[in-house]
Amino acid sequence: QVQLVESGGGFVQAGGSLSLSCAASGGTFTNYAMAWFRQAPGKEREFVAASSRSSRGRSYSESVKGRFTISRDNAENTVYLQMNSLTPEDTAIYYCAAVSTARTPTRPDDYDYWGQGTQVTVSS
């Protein structure tokens, strides 16, 4: 059973940056594709970014492409999300997710393990 714990959320003004971390335990980290999703109030959970097991494969939603960067440190069992040029539309709870696969899935249903989420609030 994989446990995921996110950290790094907070409050930032538009145009600012935040970095999220997700520490994984309970499994072999290099077996898992990792991803970030987010959910704003009243909206469905949406894909943000994903990294393959080796991090050679990365995928981003169109809304964050060029602003957000996903990375992983397999030695530290941690995946990161660097968020730059934040806008109020980025306000949401951000979730880390993991699945044992060689692919880089982008759908929430493709992921088996989830963190508890961390709140990101961007003011205008």
Image (cartoon, rainbow, N blue to C red):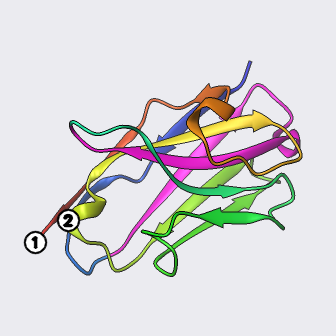
Which mark, by number, is residue 1? none
Camera-side residue: 33 or 73? 33
- Relative horizontal placement of residue 84, taking residue 34 as reference (left or right): left
Determine whether the residue tagged by mark 2 lies in a helix, strand or loop: helix
Q: Position of residue 75 (x, y in %)?
A: 82, 54
Q: Position of residue 41 (x, y in %)?
A: 21, 39
Above-or-below relation of 64 to 5? below
* Residue type, numbered disc 1: Ser
- For the residues bearing labels 2 and 1, Cβ distance under 8 angstroms: yes
Residue 26 is at least partly visible in this image: yes
* Residue type, numbered disc 2: Pro
**Residue at (71% x, 46% y) in the render:** 105
The residue labelled by disc 1 is 124
The residue labelled by disc 2 is 88
Camera-side residue: 11 or 109? 109
Determine whether the residue tagged by mark 1 lies in a helix, strand or loop: loop
Magenta region: 17-41
Residue 12 is at least partly visible in this image: no
Q: Quadrant of residue 86?
A: bottom left
